[in-house]
Image (cartoon, grey):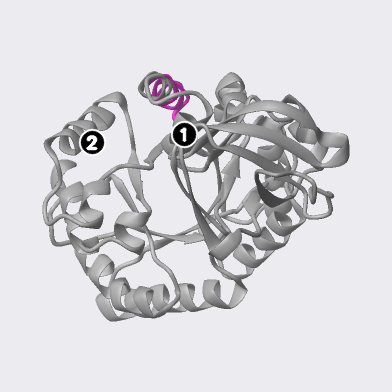
Amino acid sequence: MIEIICTVTPDVRGVERFPLVYDAGMTMLRIDFSQVDEDGARRLVRAARTFDKLRGRSVRILQDLRGPRIVVVRLPGGEVEIPVGQPVRFCSPEADCSRHRGLVVPVVMDAPFSSLESARRIATADGSLTFDVVERCTSEGWIDTSTRQAGTLRVDRPLRAPGMLAVRSLTDKDRSDINLGLELKADVVCLAGAAGPEIVKEARRIVGRKRMEVWARIETAEGIAAAGAIVKAADGIVIGRGGLAAETSLVEMPGHQSRLARLARKAGKKCIVASGILESLRWSASPTHAEIRDIAASLREGADGFLLGSETSVGRNPALAVQVLREAAGMPVNP
């Protein structure tokens, strides 16, 4: 059976959407720990177990960890429209950038700011905004860039820094969240931004003998380079296409997906495709032909499932997104 993993939030919007995606046939609920706190996670798990009893089904729980982060913490007015060529200085909140005349963007990181010394560029997590590095002084807490791809930058928006020193261990938050997942009896924990097998092995030590699968999200250049070892260490992988496009390029991403799917299939491990599955359903009442072809191609390559993010968390047609995936996979539309 193909896994149809749906992201639902624990707010009012999520309360309205949960029965829609549940009854449409999701097989796994994704709790995004980059957006959901402990209380929200508990509410989502309670909702899933309640619906299981009411509907006579069993939906599994995916705990998706936040992983190491770079997040914008302050902007004039909360968001800024940035044109091509605009100079932007990214800095630590403690850095003295008072004399800098351009746009200053303070960020917080789980890693030391000095880990950006080797960064090739800065990009939003989905790759919609990119900045070329032109100068850096990480010892003083800043890195100057020039905008390559224009867009809107917002406070709390996560960033990527392709080429930065990879974090190969769990963050303190991730360790704490895994223990919460064990308490809530989550079925799967997914490790964000896995750069090597070490982080998978660390998660296994925390999980111990509990029946929780450990998946690794491969979404960085380092993850691609270590893909064979990561696949061997994990129970499954999630192909983070948005991250891979930002870290490498949109043109290279399909090749990466094909190679990762082959590795997982050869090793007998789960392979889940994430990002941009049915993006058009955020606002449209029907998917595009390209999206349907993409789903079919992913299944032919060996994908075992799909992870829906904004399609079910904020999109206008969450139930339709689930139904389209079930139909494309040859599953009954009504479970």
Q: Residue 287 carries which label?
A: none
Q: Residues within 10 Å of mark 1 (few under 14, many from 20)?
A: some
Q: Distance between the residues labelled 2 and 1?
A: 33 Å
Which amino acid type is shown beneath numbered disc 1?
A: Val
Instruction: Reply above or below: 277 against 315.
Output: above
Q: Nearer the viewer, mark 2 or mark 1?
A: 1
Quarter of the image where the C terminus is located:
bottom left
Q: Can residue 167 be seen in this view?
A: no
Identity of the residue drawn at 27% across and 47% down: 279
Query: Looking at the rendering, which quadrant does residue 202 occupy?
Result: top right
Residue 153 lies in the magenta stretch: no
Q: Is mark 2 on a helix, strand or loop?
A: helix
Identity of the residue drawn at 71% across and 32% down: 166
Residue at the limit of the structure toward the right, as seen here: 139
Q: What stretch is highlighted in magenta?
A: 257-269
Q: Is mark 1 on a helix, strand or loop?
A: loop
Q: In this view, does 15 lie to the left or right of 326?
A: right
- Mark 2 touches mark 1? (CB < 8 Å): no
Q: Which mark is residue 84?
A: 1
Quarter of the image where the N terminus is located:
top left
Task: Measuring from the top left, give residue 125's x and y in whole percent.
Answer: 51, 43
Task: Measuring from the top left, give residue 61's x and y in whole percent.
Answer: 46, 61
Which amino acid type is shown beneath numbered disc 2?
A: Ile
Most frequent secondary structure within the magenta stretch:
helix
Disc 2: which residue: 295
Q: Can residue 200 be seen in this view?
A: yes
Q: How crowded is mark 2: few (under 14 residues within 10 Å), some or many (20 or more)?
A: many
Instruction: Please state which of residues 156 and 236 is positioned toward the viewer in this rendering.
Output: 156
Task: Measuring from the top left, give residue 242's x and y in whole percent.
Answer: 43, 38
Identity of the residue drawn at 55% across and 65% down: 77
